[in-house]
C-alpha cells in the first residue's frame, strides 16, 4: 500500500508548530527542502526568526505550570496515547523520513520509526519512576527527602541525520519529567518533527508543551540557546557547533547536554569470527549512508586477520545496492545533500595521495547521478595521524589499519579526540572485557556494532560531549535534584548554634 502524501498540502500552513498549531515563519527568508535522491525541491517554507522563537518559548513557559504540576500518572497516560498515535502514523512517518533524508524505506520502516515508537512507550512508563534516595535520617535530628523537579522550558536542537529519532530523544525524556520544550530541527529536515508534534497533540498533550521552530542555526538556534526563559539546552550535532552552543549557553548559566561528533573504532582481535566482523563492519559503516555519529569509521584489525578482512569487506561492499529509497530492495540511499556528498568525496580524493582506495571512492553515474549518491568506500594504508583517520567524514567510508599487540590496538582506538562509541570483536571474554574497560567511549559493543535500545543510555566522552539520551539516565539531564530537610527535634536552640553565638546549651 502506497502511503505517500503531498508534503506541500500537509504543511500548507507553514513549518512552525507553536502553541498547538502550524504557522508560517517570520524571518523573511525561504528554505527549500530537497529530496536528496533526485535533487528536486519538494517543499518551500519561511524560516523561523527570533520572533517565532520568542513566541514558542512563551507558549512553553505558559504551559509549564500545568504540565509540570501534573502527576506522573497523568503524564504517563498522555505518553502512552502518544506512543499509540505514533504507531498509527508509522507509514506517514516512514515516508516523510525517507523523502526528506533519502533513507532506504526499509531503514525508516524497520529502524527509525519503530525505534521512536518504542522510545515513547518506554518514557510513558519511565514517567512514573522518577526516583531518588530514600527518605531517612541521615542526620540524627533531621529527615531528608529528595525531590526531582522539572527544570522548566527546554530548548533543544536536533540534527538532520535522524530527524525523527532525534526529535524523540530530545522531546520524550524532557516532557516525561514535566518540562515543556521548544525543538529546533535542522531546517533542511523538518517533516517528521512536525508530524511528531501533531501526533502528540492528537494524543492530548496540552498546547505549548511541545513546540517546533524550523529555522537556521545562526538566528533561530542561537536565540533559542541564549533565551533567558530557557532553563536547559540539549544539542546534537558537530563538535564545532557544539562549542558555539556551549559559549552561548554559559551566558545565562543554563543546564547543558551535548551529543557531538564521533569517530568510532572497530577493533578486531586475531581470534575474532572473521565472517561476523566483516559483516558487522559493512553494516556498521554504511548505516544511514554512514551519516551516523556512532557508525564504524576506523577498523583496527590484528595483523593475522588483516588481509582477509580487507578483502572480505571490499567484496561485501561491492554487493550493496544503491537506488531509489522507496524501492524495498535498495540498501544504500543518497547522502543528505550534494554538498555533503562533495564533502565526503573531498576526503576520499585527498586520501588517494597517501592511502589506497580499495573499493568505491566515486559517485555513480546514470539515473543516480541526479541524487547525492556515493559508493561504499574502503580505504587502506592510511597513517594513524591522517585526515581520514582523525576527522569525522560522515559518509559511507571505512578506513582500515593493522595492529600487532592488544596494547597497540586499544591505544589506537583511543587515539582521536572523540569518544562516542566503539566495538571490540573477539571470542575471548578477557580480551573483550579489557577493551570495554579501557576504550574511552560512551558505548562499547562486543561482537556487534550499532544496536541501541530505549532502556540503555546513549552519549559520549571527550570531544563527543556529555550527558545521556534515552533510558532513565536521561532524567539526570532533565530534572533538578532538590534536597528537603526537616527538623525532627522541635528544639528552639540547637547545639550547633554555639558555633555562631553563645555557649553550648
Image (spheres, rainbow, N blue to C red):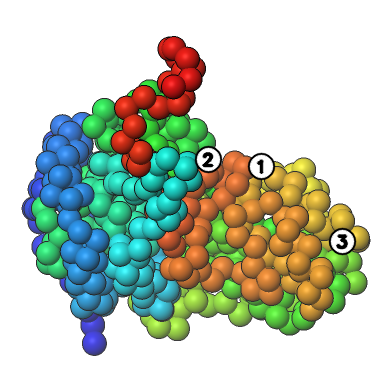
Image quarter of the N terminus: bottom left
Marks 3 and 2, the one that precedes in the sequence: 2
- Would residue 483 be found to the left or right of residue 290 on screen? left
Query: With respect to residue 462, does 422 lie above or below?
Result: below
What residue sits right under mark 2 in the picture?
239
User: At 63% across and 49% down in the image, what residue appears?
Assistant: 419
Please state the horizontal and vertical placement of residue 18, each as a whole percent of the image.
Answer: 13, 47
Task: Label 1, secondary structure: give it.
Answer: loop
Marks 1 and 2, the one that precedes in the sequence: 2
User: At 35% across and 53% down in the image, what residue appears?
Assistant: 170
The circle drawn on residue 417 is 1
- Would residue 155 be found to the left or right of residue 321 on screen? left
Task: Label 2, secondary structure: give it.
Answer: helix
* Total numbered labels: 3
- How many other residues sit within 10 Å of disc 2, few (<14), some (14-19) or many (≥20)? some
Please state the horizontal and vertical placement of residue 283, each as a whole percent of the image.
Answer: 59, 73
Task: Label 3, secondary structure: give it.
Answer: helix
- How many other residues sit within 10 Å of disc 3, few (<14), some (14-19) or many (≥20)? some
The circle drawn on residue 406 is 3
Amino acid at each position: 500500500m502506497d502511503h505517500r502524501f503531498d508534503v506541500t498540502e500537509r504543511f500548507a500552513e507553514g513549518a512552525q508548530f507553536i502553541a498547538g498549531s502550524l504557522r508560517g515563519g517570520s524571518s523573511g527568508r525561504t528554505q527549500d527542502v530537497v529530496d536528496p535522491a533526485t535533487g528536486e525541491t519538494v517543499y518551500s517554507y519561511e524560516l523561523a526568526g527570533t520572533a517565532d522563537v520568542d513566541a514558542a518559548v512563551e507558549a512553553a513557559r505558559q504551559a509549564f505550570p500545568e504540565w509540570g504540576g501534573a502527576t506522573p500518572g497523568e503524564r504517563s497516560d498522555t505518553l502512552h496515547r502518544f506512543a499509540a498515535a505514533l504507531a498509527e502514523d508509522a507509514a506517514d512517518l516512514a515516508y516523510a523520513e525517507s523523502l526528506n533524508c533519502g533513507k532506504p524505506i526499509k531503514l525508516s520502516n524497520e529502524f527509525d520509526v519503530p525505534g521512536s515508537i518504542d522510545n515513547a512507550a518506554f518514557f510513558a512508563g519511565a514517567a512514573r519512576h522518577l526516583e531518588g534516595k530514600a527518605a531517612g535520617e541521615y542526620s540524627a535530628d533531621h529527615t531528608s527527602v529528595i525531590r526531582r523537579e522539572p527544570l522548566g522550558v527546554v530548548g533543544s536542537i536536533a540534527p538532520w541525520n535522524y530527524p525523527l529519532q532525534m526529535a524523540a530523544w530530545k522531546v520524550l525524556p524532557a516532557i516525561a519529567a514535566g518540562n515543556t520544550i521548544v525543538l529546533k530541527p535542522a531546517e533542511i529536515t523538518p517533516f517528521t518533527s512536525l508530524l511528531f508534534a501533531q501526533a502528540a497533540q492528537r494524543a492530548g498533550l496540552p498546547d505549548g508543551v511541545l513546540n517546533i521552530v524550523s529555522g537556521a542555526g545562526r538566528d533561530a538556534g542561537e536565540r533559542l540557546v541564549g533565551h533567558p526563559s530557557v532553563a536547559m539546552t540539549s544539542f546534537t550535532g558537530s563538535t564545532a557547533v557544539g562549542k558555539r552552543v556551549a559559549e552561548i549557553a554559559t551566558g545565562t548559566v543554563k543546564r547543558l547536554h551535548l551529543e557531538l561528533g564521533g569517530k568510532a573504532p572497530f577493533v578486531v582481535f586475531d581470534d575474532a569470527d572473521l565472517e561476523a566482523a566483516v559483516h558487522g563492519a559493512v553494516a556498521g559503516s554504511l548505516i544511514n549512508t554512514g551519516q551516523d555519529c556512532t557508525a564504524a569509521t576506523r577498523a583496527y584489525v590484528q595483523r593475522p586477520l588483516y588481509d582477509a578482512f580487507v578483502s572480505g569487506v571490499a567484496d561485501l561492499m561491492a554487493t550493496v545496492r544503491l537506488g531509489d529509497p522507496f524501492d524495498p530492495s535498495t540498501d544504500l540511499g543518497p547522502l543528505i545533500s550534494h554538498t555533503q556528498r562533495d564533502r565526503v568525496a573531498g576526503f576520499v580524493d585527498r586520501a588517494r595521495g597517501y592511502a589506497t582506495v580499495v573499493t568505491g571512492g566515486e559517485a555513480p553515474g546514470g539515473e543516480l547521478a541526479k541524487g547525492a549518491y556515493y559508493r561504499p568506500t574502503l580505504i587502506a594504508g592510511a597513517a594513524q595521524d591522517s585526515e581520514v583517520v582523525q576527522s569525522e567524514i560522515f559518509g559511507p567510508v571505512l578506513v582500515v589499519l593493522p595492529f600487532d599487540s592488544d596494547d597497540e590496538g586499544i591505544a589506537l582506538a583511543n587515539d582521536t579526540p572523540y569518544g562516542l562509541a566503539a566495538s571490540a570483536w573477539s571470542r575471548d571474554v578477557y580480551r573483550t572485557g579489557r577493551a570495554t574497560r579501557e576504550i574511552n567511549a560512551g558505548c562499547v559493543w562486543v561482537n556487534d556494532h550499532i544496536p541501541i535500545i530505549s532502556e540503555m543510555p546513549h552519549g559520549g566522552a571527550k570531544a563527543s560531549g556529555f550527558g545521556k539520551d534515552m533510558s532513565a539516565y536521561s532524567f539526570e539531564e532533565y530534572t533538578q535534584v532538590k534536597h528537603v530537610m526537616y527538623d525532627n527535634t522541635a528544639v528552639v536552640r540547637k547545639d550547633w548554634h554555639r558555633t555562631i553565638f553563645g555557649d553550648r546549651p
